[in-house]
Amino acid sequence: VVDFTSALYLGLTHASHSLRPWAQLTTGAPAALKPPPGSGQVASRLAALMGCESAVLAPSTLHLFWDLLGLWAAREPLAIYLDAGAYPMARWGVERAQALGARVHIFPHYDAGALKRLLARTGRAGRHPLIVADGACLDSGQPAPVPAFLHCLETSGGHLVLDDTQALGIFGERPETHGPYGAGGGGTLRWHGLKSPQIILITSLAKGFGVPMACLSGSRSVIGAFKAVSDTRVYCSPPSAAALEAARQALEVNREQGEARRRRLAHLVRHFRRRLLEMGLAAGGGLFPVQTLTADPRLDPVSLYARLRQQGISTVLRQGKIQQPPLLTFVLTARHRRADLDRAVAALARAAEASHNPNFGYGG
Ligand SMILES: Cc1ncc(COP(=O)(O)O)c(C=O)c1O
């Protein structure tokens, strides 16, 4: 089976024999009492990579969104501005904050103009504004318009909380010279060349870095305040020694081979898109490794998905927007070979022809 369902974009698998052994998988003590050995060092290296002063590790982004937004809402009145396209983890954290008294406003995905108008209409003294959005958009393959978001906060103050899960390991500095993803893999802030105490990042390492663990990064004062009062650092287990070793390894591989892996990935994505075009098909997602077949009334994604499976091609069938058909997505990683992509596109073209449609034609 050729698998297009894995988001391990850089091809990092962390087989057990590749990791340094650990004496104890978990300490049995909460992080607030006894941080797992090595966690501080991994957190500092992640903060440096992502362009932040400080960071702290957690088992998942769900822990962090739930904890950070809940704590904040319990301490001061918040006005949360939630991007309509934000990943569920962010929404779940916002829901907790709302239950604790935060006002929530939703603005159209990455539309800083609409956000600015919404802030002008609803921003009131006495409520601390928080903008919550994803660092990268899978549909467009673009990083969030962070400078424009910060500009929206210029008059009111406040913070921008970004979920940078998809960007870590892919986006990095100076894309204009190191294109198309930029260099270093440090994520959205690096892409924009930005540092700001108003920005807080919540990032899973489970995609580009292949480690099921998360990190909260930002200014020293925000991270310090979070560590001092965090509930999940008291009541939940910290990340395991296995995850910490894998994160250490991911940081090393990213430093030593990250550029080569990103270059290979970009070549593969370009090749895939070119092959699709040759077949009269197209995908959204730019050069981001998540490629979603462009909606076409002549193509039924559900039957394409099933036909591809029969031909040994495993893809992701995603829920479309409200009242829209599902979406068929190919997730590419640096482990794919060009031959895999050729096979997939040929199978897709056959499936499209068979799923039939009198008007469908490919290859001119
Ligand atoms: C933007 C974003 N945030 C958070 C997550 C969840 O991360 P994890 O799988 O580590 O729980 C995902 C997973 O796809 C994601 O895309």
Image: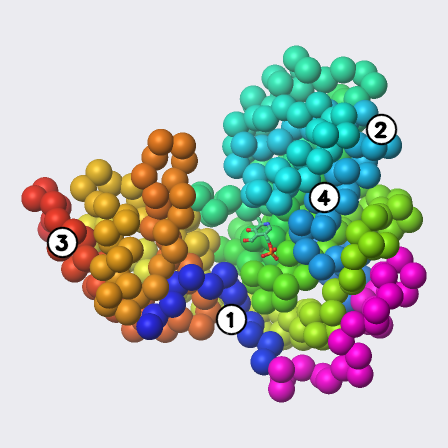
x and y percentages locating residue 21 in the rendered image: 73, 85
Dot 1 alpha-carbon crowd within 10 angstroms: few under 14, some 14 to 19, many 20 or more: many
- Disc 3 to disc 1, C-alpha distance: 32 Å
Instruction: Please tell me which residue lies in front, 137 or 90.
Output: 90
Q: Is residue 353 magenta?
A: no
Residue 209 appears in view = no
Residue pointed to by mark 2: 76
Residue 328 appears in view = yes
Please name which of the two marks, 4 or 1, marks the residue nearer to the observer: 4
Q: Which residues are magenta?
A: 16-41
Earlier sequence position, callout 4 versus callout 2: 4
Q: Secondary structure at mark 1?
A: loop
**Residue at (32, 39) in percent of width and height:** 325
In the image, 213: left or right of 300? right
Of the 4 image quadrants, the one containing the N terminus is bottom left
Q: Secondary structure at mark 3?
A: helix
- Tag of residue 53: none
Note whether 316 is above or below 82 in the view shown. below
**Residue at (18, 42) in percent of width and height:** 298
Q: Report if the CB atoms under discs 3 and 2 are less than 8 Å apart.
A: no
Residue pointed to by mark 4: 66
Earlier sequence position, callout 3 versus callout 1: 1
Task: Give, as a three-letter code, the residue at label 1.
Answer: Gly
x and y percentages locating residue 152 in the rendered image: 67, 26
Earlier sequence position, callout 1 versus callout 2: 1
